[in-house]
């Protein structure tokens, strides 16, 4: 594994994950939160550019009228101001549904340090953006859920730097996700913005983890920012008494495998993390890293050499009470605490890479994670540029989170229909993942299970599942699909020989609404509870079931859902309401998960 890592860890990101941007943003530095950073968060000036005139009029120059005949039909000063990080939709009623361009701007002073490099880091911008510094375009990025950075060494002034960001969230057929998706199309600079100081030659990336199968062997690889041979490096894990010395090769990389004694493996019951220190003569990075083994054998998923049942839940990167994107550590605590109360040991981060606060906090709290990119229905699988965008996006996701031991699954798709172009598209994504990380489990969620009346069993016919380590199925029995047999006779013959997860099930209910427990259109907590009881009974008859993940933890916003009294732009499948109240089905899932040891 380590030799494969040496040769091609960056190949997916650099070669097969190119975008069509004129000025492509750079690979984000590993562990930006462990670096010397200065936050650019706060109030930014903004202009709503409804007809996309800003670039034509070069408003990124921020010109001021000087002569008697000068005037400009725009101004950042004394106008709209928006919070960064945040979405724009939740900050003004007029922007609730807005899809289009908004320009952000702010000024900053910075003293360029001698023998240092300076980069501009964005945790995420939704969905596409162009970055301008002091009147010059310096980079662009597409993809609303992954980080990127742009080196600005030599481009900044000591005082009066003007930074402008052109942000556009317009849905397009070649985008990821595409034209239609069942969550809110939030736009804006939605995650942290930093200035990052590094030495001229710095530790750009590292991958340090436990061997896939061995409980006492750690594999490590380090990459410098430059191809400098002969640079001495060290890896220290003080609590384990580890100090390993390495020397970079002609590519500026180094690797080592070593054995450790008395290692306590990370698990949901004991989420142990160790301080790891990576040093070079000019740079040092510290990070808390956990170590665990995860693999599949037959129809079982093994964590630390023991079979595990995945007691999962999904949620969107959204604070329902605020009707906006989650972006902070307190937001992460709110979302994850409710999952912990439910008795979960896993989170499916639906349907896109969520912010790093959520990922890191989940690891500390003992959650396994399933992370995916938004290949959600409607993707143009025949479009080569879309495929390259998807490869770029999944590469950025894996590069950011590969050192998080909580990451168990890389998800490559959700609810896609079989076809030759789809298969090739998804194989490309799997290849992009494995070029960086061969140790996690690959999965995808399908909605293709059907009832075979001749055999009186549920089946699924999609040969692509053999490309996956674990098969996942979304099946809304009792909601989108009525029962062909009673739940106690609902036997499954799906993905035999592989572990199976029911990755979505459930139905909508308006909190506090009572009604007939057997009438779907009641939109009641009573019917939702019946639906959950029936599905839990069905699960007893899925022999290779190794996890469940009801959809979804919280009610979430979606323009898909426009029933005037029961939805009102909300998907009501949550076990918890948009106001934070637990529905009857929450208690049923809590009892079910507590019964599984």
Image (cartoon, grey):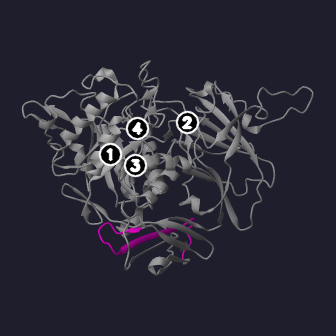
Residues tagged 3 and 1 counted as in contact (Cβ below 8 A): yes
Which residue: 48% across, 30% down?
172
Q: Nearer the viewer, mark 1 or mark 2?
A: 1
Dot 1 or dot 2, earlier in sequence:
2
Residue at numbered disc 1: 590
Q: SS at mark 1?
A: helix
Image position, residue 202 (x, y; %): 60, 67
Dot 3 or dot 2, earlier in sequence:
2
What's the CA distance linking mark 4 and mark 2?
A: 17 Å
What's the CA distance linking mark 3 and mark 1?
A: 8 Å
Q: Is residue 356 rendered to the left or right of residue 72?
A: left
Residue at numbered disc 4: 582
What's the CA distance linking mark 1 and mark 2?
A: 26 Å
Image position, residue 66 (x, y; %): 90, 33
Against 53, is 299 above or below? Answer: below
Dot 1 or dot 4, earlier in sequence:
4
Q: Is residue 271 rendered to the left or right of residue 277?
A: left
Q: Is residue 236 rendered to the left or right of residue 584?
A: right
State the quadrant of the N terminus.
bottom left
What's the CA distance linking mark 3 and mark 2?
A: 21 Å
Residues tagged 3 and 2 counted as in contact (Cβ below 8 A): no
Residue at numbered disc 3: 341
Magenta extent: 209-229
Quadrant of residue 303 in the image? bottom left
Residues tagged 1 and 2 counted as in contact (Cβ below 8 A): no
The mark tally for this picture is 4
Quadrant of residue 494 in the image? top left
Residue at numbered disc 2: 322
- Quick check: can you spot residue 423? no
Callout 3: few (<14), some (14-19), or many (20+) C-alpha neighbours within 10 Å?
A: few
């Amino acid at each position: 594994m380590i030799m494969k890592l040496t040769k091609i860890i960056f190949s997916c990101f650099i070669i097969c994950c190119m975008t069509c941007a004129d000025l492509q943003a750079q690979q984000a530095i590993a562990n930006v939160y462990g670096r010397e950073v200065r936050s650019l968060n706060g109030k930014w000036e903004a202009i709503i550019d409804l007809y996309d005139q800003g670039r034509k009029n070069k408003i990124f120059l921020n010109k001021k009228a000087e002569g008697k005949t000068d005037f400009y039909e725009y101004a950042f000063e004394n106008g709209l101001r928006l919070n960064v990080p945040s979405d724009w939709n939740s900050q003004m009623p007029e922007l609730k549904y807005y899809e289009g361009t908004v320009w952000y701007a702010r000024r900053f002073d910075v003293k360029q340090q001698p023998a240092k490099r300076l980069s501009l880091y964005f945790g995420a911008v939704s969905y596409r953006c162009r970055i301008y510094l002091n009147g010059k375009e310096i980079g662009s990025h597409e993809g609303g859920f992954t980080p990127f950075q742009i080196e600005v060494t030599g481009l900044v002034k000591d005082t009066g730097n003007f930074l402008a960001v052109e942000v556009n969230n317009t849905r397009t057929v070649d985008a990821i996700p595409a034209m239609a998706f069942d969550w809110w199309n939030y736009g804006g600079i939605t995650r942290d913005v930093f200035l990052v100081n590094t030495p001229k030659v710095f530790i750009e990336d590292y991958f340090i983890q436990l061997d896939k199968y061995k409980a006492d062997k750690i594999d490590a690889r380090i990459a410098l920012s430059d191809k400098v041979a002969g640079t001495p490096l060290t890896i220290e894990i003080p609590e384990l008494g580890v100090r390993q010395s390495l020397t970079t090769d002609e590519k500026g990389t180094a690797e080592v495998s070593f054995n450790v004694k008395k290692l306590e493996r990370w698990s949901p019951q004991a989420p142990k993390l160790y301080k790891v220190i990576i040093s070079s003569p000019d740079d040092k990075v510290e990070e808390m890293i956990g170590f665990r083994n995860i693999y599949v054998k037959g129809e079982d998923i093994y964590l630390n050499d023991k079979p595990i049942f995945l007691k999962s839940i999904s949620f969107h990167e959204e604070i329902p009470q605020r009707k906006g994107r989650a972006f902070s550590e307190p937001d992460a605590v709110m979302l994850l605490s409710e999952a912990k109360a439910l008795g979960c040991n896993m989170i499916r981060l639906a349907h896109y890479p969520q912010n790093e606060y959520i990922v890191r906090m989940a690891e500390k709290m003992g959650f396994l994670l399933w992370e995916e990119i938004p290949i959600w229905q409607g993707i143009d699988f025949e479009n080569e540029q879309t495929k390259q965008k998807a490869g770029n996006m999944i590469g950025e996701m894996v590069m950011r989170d590969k050192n998080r031991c909580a990451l168990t699954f890389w998800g490559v798709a959700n609810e896609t229909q079989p076809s030759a172009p789809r298969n090739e598209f998804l194989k490309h994504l799997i290849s992009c993942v494995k070029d960086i990380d061969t140790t996690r489990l690959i999965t995808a969620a399908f909605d293709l299970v059907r009832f075979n009346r001749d055999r009186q069993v549920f089946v699924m016919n999609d040969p692509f599942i053999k490309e996956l380590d674990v098969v996942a199925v979304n099946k809304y029995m009792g909601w989108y699909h009525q029962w062909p047999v009673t739940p106690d006779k609902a036997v499954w013959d799906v993905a035999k020989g592989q572990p199976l997860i029911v990755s979505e099930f459930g139905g909508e209910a308006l909190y506090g609404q009572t009604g007939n427990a057997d009438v779907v259109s009641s939109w009641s907590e009573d019917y939702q509870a019946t639906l959950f009881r029936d599905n839990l009974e069905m699960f007893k008859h899925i022999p290779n079931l190794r996890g469940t993940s009801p959809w979804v933890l919280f009610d979430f916003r979606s323009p898909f859902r426009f029933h005037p009294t029961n939805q009102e732009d909300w998907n009501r499948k949550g076990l918890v309401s948009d106001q934070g109240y637990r529905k009857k089905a929450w208690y049923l899932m809590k009892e079910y998960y507590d019964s599984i040891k």
